[in-house]
Image (cartoon, rainbow, N blue to C red):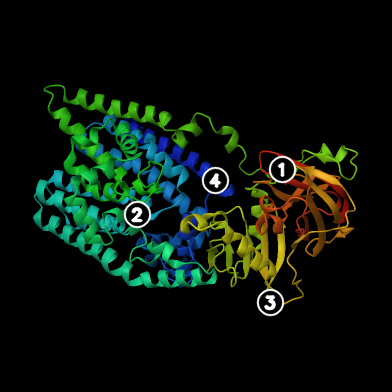
């Protein structure tokens, strides 16, 4: 009881931290189940740990389908190896996510320890520990970013700082204490390639302000050597693997590689700073010799606002102790000196601010100590006042900047989070009661471009040992395998190719034309080695089965004449003039259907796509799948008035679908407006 009373505030902080941890576990489980975490970056992190556990040290599949060590992608963050034993016990991407949540959330206790060490006040230490939990950037890292090595090492830097300051204040540097200090520093440097510069600058601080010359110089040497090896030796040495993989990828798609020169650089991310030069030395020199330009870039665009969002929650106090704040200079330089358009690296919701956070809080603690020491006889009151101000500013900015943890705690997203664990299957019990005639047009549910139920079924259908080419958002769920490439990478080689023609990640990265995706979809539809294994929503799973009896004719043919049998307008003058449906479909086996359309008028079909809906007449469960040919090969926007378009549909209903009688509809949608037309009934076995 005496211990609880004397340590009440510390115990209260532990309880608060545990509560924040539980909240964030719930948020992250929901985001994972909602497919908000993709291959980049949680899938990559998981794949590296899984591959390391299986003897391929830090290997992953890059953007372009090449299996390579992490440093070939211009990152050096071996801290992931530390999670292999834990991952061996529970093999899931959530292992990494929850591990990071624990490490960062309970870093509040280290902030408490450092604050108590310096300020000699448990209440002040408690207030600053709470401030850490409320700090908006911490909220975003906990709730949004999944896992990154640079985030996971936050407590190691705080721990190293505490260990040193404790020895320094006690004027007793023990061998055990120094060993722990160095272990924590090494773990910290394992978080990312630029963190050794933190150790270099921290060593400089110790050398100048703590007068521990031997230790300070040792840290500077170790930090600089590690940084130099990472940036100038390891990353460039392995860059040829990335470049070779990209050349192979580009060749498979007949792409002009001269349009994406950043991929061929020694460091993939150098193009972000290309206005300052094409090499490390040139960039650094130009930043020094052109301070006006450097200042314009540093504060340009939304970066001034990002600086405000970084410092305002701490009432600008870190600026009052620049000698510690300067330790975070490497990430401020990396994040704020980008010149490439559309690249955001300085936002508080970006994991790249992670290592800035512990330095900001340490600077705040020491700034409070400094400012309080300038007030005669009011030092303790000033300390508590400043700590209270920091808490208030963090509370205010959490509200202002939409800290996701704050939003959850205020029940602003309670309705969304209540969906955790709920099945997302669509049902429509009203339509099954309607007496529909062929050609009747109704407003049925639109085809979703983020159908979680379909995505879960697709994930479950892929064997663990199979290589996969698929969309980014499935990459976390399918990460525990040797090869997972982002479609269209490896679309001619993977065991399974998952097509989602809504997905645009590679196209965006390469700034390529969307027609590239259509060409690839056409190739795989025609490829005699691939068979459609499953169609669900906007996802189509093709399995590599080798040569088989596959129609050579494209599934969408344009004709000038056709003997019309029907005149059934769906919407926007798009009219069905003929169609064939199978009388029955056996789940797990492919069935054939045919639709013939024409445009009566010159109405715009921009943004529209066609899809099929199967409505269970007993349960009202709705199963939908896009019409692949008109979806990804020859889209409606290109269709010509008064021409006929014959679309052959390959229907692959999954085994999880309930057998029974189904109503069949053809629909068209641009997400905003949707119309579906009843075609008839089909029996599913």
Count residues near mark 2 (Cα–Cα under 10 Å), then give few for <14, some for 14-19, many for 20+.
some
Q: Taking 317 as reference, is 95 above or below it?
A: below
- The residue labelled by disc 2 is 272
| Residue 570 placement: quadrant | top right
Mark 4 / mark 1, whichever is N-terminal:
4
| Disc 2/disc 4 C-alpha distance (Å) | 29 Å
**Which residue corresponds to mark 4?**
31
Name the disc covering residue 546, or none.
Answer: 3
Q: CA distance from mark 4 to mark 1?
A: 40 Å
Mark 4 vs mark 1, foreground winner is 1
Q: CA distance from mark 3 to mark 4?
A: 37 Å
- Label 2 SS: helix
N-terminal of the pair, mark 3 or mark 4, is: 4
Up the image or down, 460 lies above or below 333; here it is below
What crowding class fits label 3: few (fewer than 14 Cα within 10 Å), some (14-19), or many (20 or more)?
few
Residue 264 position, x and y percent, is 38, 67
């Amino acid at each position: 009881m005496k211990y609880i009373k004397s340590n009440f505030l510390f115990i209260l902080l532990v309880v608060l931290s545990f509560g924040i941890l539980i909240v964030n576990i719930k948020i992250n489980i929901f985001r994972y189940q909602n497919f908000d975490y993709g291959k980049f970056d949680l899938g990559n992190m998981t794949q590296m740990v899984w591959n390391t556990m299986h003897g391929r040290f830090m290997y992953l599949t890059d953007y372009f389908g090449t299996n390579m060590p992490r440093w070939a992608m211009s990152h050096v963050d071996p801290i992931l190896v530390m999670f292999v034993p834990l991952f061996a016990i529970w093999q899931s991407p959530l292992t990494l996510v929850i591990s990071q949540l624990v490490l960062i959330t309970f870093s509040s206790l280290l902030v408490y320890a450092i604050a108590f060490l310096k300020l000699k006040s448990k209440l002040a230490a408690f207030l600053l520990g709470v401030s850490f939990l409320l700090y908006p950037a911490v909220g975003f890292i906990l709730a949004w970013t999944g896992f990154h090595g640079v985030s996971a090492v936050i407590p190691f830097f705080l721990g190293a700082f505490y260990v040193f300051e404790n020895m320094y204040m006690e004027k007793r540097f023990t061998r055990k204490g120094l060993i722990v200090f160095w272990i924590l520093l090494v773990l910290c440097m394992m978080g990312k390639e630029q963190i050794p510069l933190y150790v270099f600058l921290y060593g400089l601080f110790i050398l100048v302000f703590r007068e521990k010359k031997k230790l300070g110089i040792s840290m500077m040497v170790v930090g600089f050597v590690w940084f130099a090896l990472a940036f100038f030796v390891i990353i460039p040495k392995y860059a040829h693997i990335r470049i070779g993989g990209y050349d192979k990828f580009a060749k498979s798609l007949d792409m002009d590689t001269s349009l994406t020169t950043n991929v061929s650089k020694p460091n993939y991310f150098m193009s972000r700073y290309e206005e300052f030069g094409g090499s490390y030395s040139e960039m650094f020199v130009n930043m020094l010799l052109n301070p006006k330009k450097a200042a314009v870039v540093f504060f340009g665009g939304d970066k001034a606002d990002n600086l405000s969002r970084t410092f305002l929650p701490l009432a600008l106090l870190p600026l009052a102790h620049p000698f510690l704040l300067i330790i975070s200079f490497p990430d401020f330089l990396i994040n704020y000196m980008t010149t490439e358009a559309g690249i955001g690296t300085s936002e508080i919701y970006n994991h790249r601010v992670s290592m800035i956070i512990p330095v900001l809080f340490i600077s705040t603690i020491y700034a409070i100590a400094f400012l309080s020491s300038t007030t005669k006889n009011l030092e303790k009151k000033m300390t508590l006042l400043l700590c209270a101000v920091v808490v208030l500013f963090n509370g205010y900015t959490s509200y202002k900047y939409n800290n996701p943890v704050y939003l959850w705690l205020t029940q602003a997203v309670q309705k969304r989070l209540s969906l955790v664990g709920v099945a997302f299957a669509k049902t429509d019990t009203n339509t099954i009661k309607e007496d529909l005639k062929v050609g009747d047009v109704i407003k049925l549910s639109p085809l979703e471009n983020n159908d979680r139920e379909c995505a879960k079924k697709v994930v479950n259908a892929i064997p663990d040992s199979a290589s996969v080419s698929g969309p980014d958002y499935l990459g976390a769920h399918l990460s525990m395998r040797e090869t997972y490439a982002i479609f269209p990478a490896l679309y001619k080689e993977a065991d399974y190719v998952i097509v989602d023609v809504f997905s645009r990640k590679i196209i965006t990265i390469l700034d390529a034309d969307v027609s590239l995706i259509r060409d690839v979809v056409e190739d795989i539809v025609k490829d005699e080695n691939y068979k459609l294994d499953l169609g669900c929503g906007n996802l189509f799973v093709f399995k590599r089965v080798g040569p088989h009896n596959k129609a050579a004719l494209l599934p969408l043919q344009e004709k000038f004449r056709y003997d019309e049998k029907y005149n059934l307008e769906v919407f926007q003058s798009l009219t069905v003039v003929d169609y064939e449906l199978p009388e029955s479909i056996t789940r797990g086996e492919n069935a054939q259907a045919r639709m013939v359309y024409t445009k009566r008028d010159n109405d715009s079909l921009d943004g529209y796509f066609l899809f099929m809906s199967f409505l269970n007449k007993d349960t009202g469960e709705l199963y939908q799948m896009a019409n692949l040919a008109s979806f990804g090969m020859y889209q409606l926007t290109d269709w010509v008035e008064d021409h006929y378009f014959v679309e052959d549909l390959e229907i692959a209903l999954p085994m999880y679908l309930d057998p029974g009688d189904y109503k069949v509809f053809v629909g068209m949608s641009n997400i905003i407006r949707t119309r579906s037309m009843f075609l008839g009934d089909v029996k599913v076995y």
